[in-house]
Image: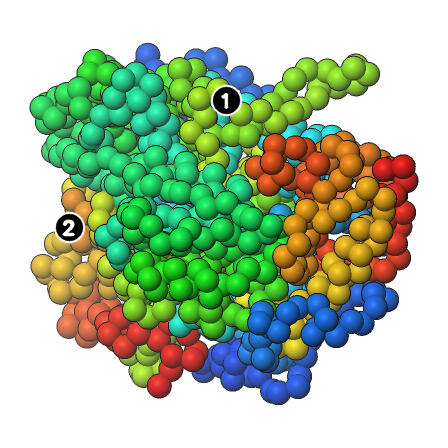
Amino acid sequence: MTKDAAHSPAAGGRASSAPLMGRDAEPTLFELSQPGRRAWQLRTTDVPEVPPEELVPAAHRRESPPRLAEVSERDLVAHFTRLSHRQFSVDLGAYPLGSCTMKYNPKVCDAVALLPGLADAHPAAPASCSQGWMALLVELEEALCAVTGMAAATLQPAAGAAGELTGLLLMRAWHEAHGNPRRKVVIPDSAHGTNPASVTLGGYETVTVKSDARGCVDLEALRSVLDTDVAGIMLTNPNTLGLFEEDIVETAAAVHEVGGLLYYDGANLNAILGVVRPGDMGFDVVHLNLHKTFATPHGGGGPGAGPVAVSERLAPFLPGPRPTRVGPGADGAGDRYEWSTPPRSIGRVHSWHGNALVLARALTYVLVHGDDGLREVAQRAVLNANWLRKRLSGTFDAPYDRPCMHECVLSASSLKKRTGVRALDVAKRLLEEGFHSPTVYFPLIVEEALMIEPTETESLQTLEALAEACERIVAAAASPDGAREAIEAPHATPVRRVDEALAARNLVPTFDARR
Amino acid sequence: MSGYTPHTEAEIDSMLEFLGLESIDELFAAVPLALRLAGGTGLAPGAPEPDVLVRMRRLAAANRPISEELVCFAGGGAYDREVPPVTRALASRSEFVTSYTPYQPEVAQGVLQALFEFQTLVARLTGMEVANASLYDGAAALVEAVNLCVSATGREHVWVSQGVNPSWRQVLSTFAAGTGHAIEVLPLADGSTAWPPDRDAEAPAAVVVSYPNYLGCLEDLSEARALCDRTGAMLVVAFDPICAGLLRSPGDWRADVVVGEGQPLGMPLGFGGPYLGLFACNSANVRRLPGRLVGETVDAEGRRAYVTTLRAREQDIRREKATSNVCTNQTLMAVTAAIQMGWLGTSGIAEVALRSARGADYCRKALLAVTGVEPLVSAPTMGEFALRLPVDASLLVERLADDGFLAGIALDDEYTQGRRDGLLVAVTERRTRSEIDSFADSFAKALR
């Protein structure tokens, strides 16, 4: 392939360098291990060197140390650096993975998380030693309430799914306090998989409601399942098709009419920051994914943070203990903070206070953006997504041909019929074009779905390069050779398509399980 | 207005023109006018990075961190362990920090292989066959373990030792409101769980015990195992990954599921998070495992490769029938722990465990020499121990903070028959003899 000429210049978000040193497999830490080698160094303590036999009763002592790996510091650095070279990341190139909001993560947030006053604070230290942290958490809670239009929030949930379950338990507690926890929770057929999984763990039964031809909740279908056994509905707005639920006010009224509550899945909040708020749409419970909307880095799959904000009437049920501002201290020098547990709290949902260093990053992100910056985030995310949707709507099918919000859902259905090349193949070809692939085969209600979320941090040049890459892939698929190349892609990545069936059939979850 | 979006005014105009729009607002035509925020969110305008850094430094300075102001003798599930520059440097590589869940394995071999190594290291440490790719924290791992046991046995009663971290037990009871599991706490007697004699009560799905327990005590797990063998319950052991360097592994005690808090494996205290939920079990239960699991396989050219596997357990495929709702986990912490375990190695983990036990033994004797201080329980301990004080423990903690010590954790009165005089003290490999000596001096002075 002659790549150089084919690409637009100055596409900042296209990763141009694939594996640095060929495509040999990196040995595991265990294969690099040499008996007797070591990296560790510990503090000189001068504590008396009592033998283990005098410290731990024989019945509890292990016979030999656990076999870990035995490597030098140099081996360790080389190994993990080489592994990092086999990994795509936002810092390397554009990551238009729909529903995941893989935007650029400002480095200033990392710098804050490294401050010793934050990173080295023990979570069980008395409140008198933790005033800075408590002030930070209260400030973040207030900011998240301002953005969502809610009254109070818990910062404990460690990720979106943990937030969902917390929110469902809040709904359950509220209904119980009003006589009956109810039995069912309604979710649309376009919902994320975590929604129904959380509903089950919340002790509810999932009732799925169809989307209509426009891609939104079918209001009539919804009305037909609503009764006084429905605890509430979980909605993502904009939904997973990237479309704003235009009938949200009517939806909220219908659910509230039967005494149900509205749960807002914040996965797609990036689209509406500073433009419209879940609280104003009628939602009672909102979870946020700080690792999406508020740019805390995703860490290869976590840590996230999934705070849950609620309306006034649900605040007494929030998890505790929570940091609370109690006004100026006796010395008059600034506000004081204490831990308090709401009167009808559902209890703790985290070992401590939540993923605190993630929360500190999120507050930093809020402060550098502010009211104007957050609105600009939403505007530009929506602008980028619509530009790509229009640009690519001749290349792929556009099942919902109307303006989208922060992401667009296209389909490779015609391409597959025409050439045999599927959404998955397009995704794999994009990897070697220097882009992370979009989300494929989700939402489930779109055939051969390609869900593209460019985010606001990619430039027009990057969008152009991404569109050109898609066009090139589709054009090449027209010839049998080109189609075969797509079906066999990727070729230039650290490994080629992996045998997932073999991994499941012949399970090797550890080095020691190898035959 | 931030510097993180690249659009120039001219580019915005050209993009709007391409879309046939006059203004950015038209992009939001689907949002009913009546709902749109007219007056903004009420947040202040954005501030430049340097200004925000000044603000955040000021907030940080209002804490008393253990690195700069307090010598740490507090534990309770969060420990002041050695985290070397090499772990911090490797774990902060942006390829690990800014990537997503490895759904495209061809460009995610770095994270996938690191997770495979993490799973191997946790399996070796626990003495189990399989470990998952992480959960949120120790409490979340406990909740998932109980869910696994309930699903495997078809029973819903769960017996949990009072020696399990009280915060984890609170989280367990919060989530039981949804699942309907009946959680029964079995009290400690002199530091060890008082297992009930065989009785008519409904047989439990799981028996949960902590090793060492919250008070630092080493319980004889063969009693819990025998109880499980008699009742058909599964044994869940909450272990400490550092103490495991010296103690018999949970697998050796024949645990069915092992959970733990992975923070001591390279994570800063960070006011409680992000930490790392450790979860291990045997192959028999692998299809009930919560969360992600990485397996080894080959690519189209037959080269070794890694991929997330047994995906049919997970929420995005199985939806309401999934084994767990977990999606985002703590991958970066798992990678950090793999690096830290690589740094410690076989000899290092044993040495850290031994030095912690020595420090705790030395400190315990020094504090027990102070008039009026007594051991709370007589069971053998490792790394952490509980004292009974002649004063309110939280007052002593406040008083010693003035002297530059985080003296420990004032125990909840469930451990002290309603009194407030229990103190939980942890000593790690980082505490020197002179720090312990001065701590004991301050302790004595404060109680005088």
Closest to the observer, B314 or B165: B165
Closest to the observer, B126 or A259: B126
Q: Examine the rendering and report whether any part of residue A417 can be seen.
A: yes
Q: Residue at x 9, y 24 (%)?
A: A224
The chain to which mark 1 is attached is: A
Residue A442 lies, in percent from the top left, at 24, 49
Q: Amino acid at mark 2?
A: Glu
Residue B22 lies, in percent from the top left, at 35, 24
Q: Which picture quadrant has residue A505? A: bottom left
First-in-chain label (1 vs 2): 1
Pointer 1 residue: A342
Q: CA distance from mark 1 to mark 2?
A: 46 Å
> Taking B62 as reference, is B360 above or below it?
below
Closest to the observer, A149 or A334: A334
Q: How many marks?
A: 2
**Disc 1 element:** loop
Q: Residue at x 40, y 53 (%)?
A: B197
> Taking A442 as reference, is A236 above or below it?
above
The chain to which mark 2 is attached is: A
Pointer 2 residue: A447
Q: Examine the rendering and report whether any part of residue B328 can be seen.
A: no
Callouts 1 and 2 on one subunit: yes
**In the picture, which quadrant includes the N terminus of chain A?**
bottom left
A195 lies left or right of A147: left
